Image (tube, helix red, strand yellow):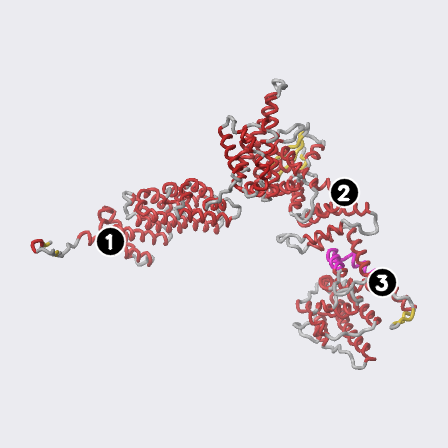
Amino acid sequence: MADVGVIFDRIEKNLETESSSEFMTAVFNKKFITSKDKNSELTDSYEILSTHLINIIQEIDTLATEIERNDDFLISVKHQKVLRTCFQIISSFGIASCLIPGLGISLSKRCISAKSLPQLTLSDEQKYKILVTCTDFLHRSYNVPVLKNIIITFHLIDYLAALIQLAFAPLKKPGVYPKFTMSQEMYDELNSERQKYVEIYEYLVNNCFQPMLMKELLMLQNVTDQKCPLFVKRVIAKELSRRLIASGGLLSLIRCFIDNQDMDTGLDWKKVEMICKIVSTKHGNIDESEYLTNITYQLKHIFAINKVKYIITAVSCLISLYDKYKNVEHVQNLVNEIFYTLNYDVLTSKSSFPGTVILTPQEIEHSMQILYSCTSMSQAHIPPELITPNLYILFHLRMKCTKNEMKLKITNIILKALELCDNTEMCDLLKKLLFGQINAKEVDVLIEEYKAGLTVKYVNSHVEYPEDEAVINFVEIFNSTENNTLISNLFEACLQIFVDISSERLANTNTDTLLSSDDEPTLLKSNDEKYARILTILSEISMTPKVMKVLKENPLIVINFVESILLNNIDNTTDECQTIALVLLNTILSNTNKAHSLKDKLHSFIPNLEKLCNSDSAYIKILCKESMSLIKSEYPKATDSAFEEALSNIFDNLIPMRAHGIIELSKLIDKTDPETISKRHYVLCLLQEQLKDPDSYIYLSTINCIAALALHCTDDVLSVLCKEYLNVSIDHHNIESKENENKAAELRMKIGDIIVKVTKRLNEMALVHKNILLNTILCACRDEDPLIRASALSNLAEIALILNYKIGSIIYEVLLCIWSIIESDKAIECRRASVMVIASLLKGLGNETLVELKENLLPIYRTLNKLYKDTNEDPVLRLHAQLALDELNDNVKQFLFTELPIEKEISMLKERNDIFFK
């Protein structure tokens, strides 16, 4: 240990710098200033630099010898910093300054002040000697773990650059050149040394951490300040090709680019695209088939790692290979293995015993992860044929799944697949999802969910398709998308399915050739069920805000549907079809501004609308007349009222917009807006639904809006507020988090304040509702939370004051509640509030105290007197008791000793006879 300390002392003395100074200052303290004598300029610069570097190298070699003797030796942080400074000096002045221009990182890139430093003038031979000395030193140090760590972390790029130059730089043939003479002996010596450095280079690239090696090679290949030499580009390109097709090379390339990426901020898709370009281009001396075999094998290994960012990159690479080598067997096999794991046709083609698990929960989760990675690839083109074949099983899996995280993941995959689906295929695809496979197979798959997850089993019989669950599943998926294009395509496909099924029903009804009596009811029942289900879907989605928004922007969807009903197929449609078509048409005509571009097509509907006016259905007649009126009047669009705008905001998906809509609605109520007040019961029902929102901002805005309705539907509002006031604690009864408990208590106290505000608004009318008000507050006085109890007692005093203390027999229940809190409650805040309520009650009753309290007056006095005289009692509570006793004393005096007014009023009139005395 003493020897090592002496070595570091010598190194620091050699650097002639303190630990806080930069290494540049340490080097240039040696006065590397060119001599005035030009003949000795080269010699002086070389000797000064060489001597300084050799001194540092010798000391570090001595240190390495000591470290190798003692494997348990530890280097302090201070000494590690000294070593890093030494390696920086060696790399910057011994390697970087001696490299060919364009190879490695120049000194100006390493230090801001490098441009202002004097330039060293060295000959090519001198540079070579210094470079060899420093490279041999790095090679020796690479075998010492402590020093190897410094080289790998900070100076690998310098080490690689030096080896590339010494091992692969072209040599001049023996001869005489303007500034240099190459002798045969020197040429042979350089070739011999080249072989040595080639071996060192091969050892380094084969044993170095591959992602870091690739990163440093790419940096050397893309030097920007000077043009990179051609031999360097060839060497690096060849080496990168070798690394790529080596075992684990593709994974190393991916890690080189994206290991430092934070998945919370997303992948850098430019880097992923670069990796895809590299992978899809053949590298090395092998043929194309061998290269693709190698890459697909590596991709298969990466997919097995099951790490998100690796899977996303691997999927992108596989898609790039598929686009370029679609017909190559190895690529096609990997695509089938990765993307078609949930393909219904593939699963049912596997022969197995009934009940055999085809896909385990782990396999399904892995397949989901691969398919889910496609949902984030918005920048890349995804061939639809890779995802859409899995839709049928994905739809099944979502119906069976109960775990929210997995269900959300499946939903996103299905939406992505539907986005990629062509419009011409959308209708057939939805029919398969909603009504099952058209041609039932002898074998089928059964999907079940266990604690471990979802499984797919093989069965040797047809499994009945759950059409009712499929309808619910489809509506949930439809409601979860915000993509207007997809909404438009799905709605248009549903309309087309409705027309097709309606036509089939009508054809089966009017046909003369019937099936046998056993089969006919089944056929008709099947079509009727499909018809009812598609009607259910249309009724659920057609009036949603997102569909209305899409139809306003693209009314052609409805126009084409109406055209197919009214012009092309009016005699073969049912009343339901005609009704739906007319309702949609009227909705579009009265809500869109883009119908003017379809003027000619709309006017072509008029003859058929006139024909439908003779229909037996009164409802169709009304709709037809409305449609013709809108078309002939150039479909005027009514402007939205303030009430409608507020409702529109309430139904928005964004929380701030919904809260804004509720606040605007409460303002309209305060202004007694006629439309809002006329629909007050609808508004109240709407606000009750908003109370279920978990967001506290929405909740409190809703409570305030309900309070604003108090003057217009008092009974309903008080019922809702009192129920919420008592039920908030029930909703959060099992919450373990202290933060959530405090949040629930805060909400309850705010609702209590709002109940008091509503009572103040009602003023004298509040007396009618005293039972529900006082019973609610008394229930809250028995709550487990002391803050709620104290708040409830405060609210009790306020409400009693508003009621002018005309609470009848309930006063005895109030007193009983107060006594129990004073005598048994452990929370001092609640006891203070109880005594304050008594003081407020005595003050409010005034002269009627003795009449109202009767036999309860004596216990009140004794309790207050006891609290006041107890010196160990809380001082604030004693103060409240003193105030209450003072009020009681004043009330008794006024009741017992009522002062008679001693006054005489004299009034004088103009006439003398009218004088009187009073």
Query: Quick check: can you spot residue 477?
Result: no
Q: Which residue is mark 3?
A: 196
Q: Amino acid at mark 3?
A: Lys
- Percent across and percent down for residue 912 are 7, 56
Residue closer to the observer: 479 or 692: 479
Check whether the beta carbons of the residues at disc 1 and disc 2 lie within 8 A of each other. no
| Marks 3 and 1, the one that precedes in the sequence | 3
Could you tell whether 681 is left or right of 58 in the image? left
Q: Looking at the image, which residue sits at the far top?
A: 517
Which type of secondary structure does the marked residue at label 3 adopt?
helix
Mark 3 crowd level (few <14, some 14–19, many ≥20, 10 Å Cα): some
Q: Is residue 195 magenta?
A: yes
Q: Quadrant of the C terminus?
A: bottom left
Which type of secondary structure does the marked residue at label 1 adopt?
helix
> What count of labels does the image hold?
3
Q: Amino acid at mark 1?
A: Leu
Tell me, for residue 326, which label it has, or none: 2
Tell me, for residue 888, which label it has, or none: 1
Could you tell whether 164 is left or right of 770 in the image? right
Which type of secondary structure does the marked residue at label 2 adopt?
loop
Check whether the beta carbons of the residues at disc 2 and disc 3 lie within 8 A of each other. no
- Percent across and percent down for residue 888 are 24, 53
For the record, the magenta segment spans 194-218
C-alpha distance separating marks 2 and 3: 45 Å
Q: Quadrant of the N terminus?
A: bottom right
Q: Amino acid at mark 2?
A: Lys
Mark 1 crowd level (few <14, some 14–19, many ≥20, 10 Å Cα): many
| Residue 313 against residue 58 in the figure, above or below | above
Q: Is residue 299 magenta?
A: no
- Percent across and percent down for residue 90 are 75, 69
| Marks 2 and 3, the one that precedes in the sequence | 3
Could you tell whether 795 is left or right of 99 in the image? left
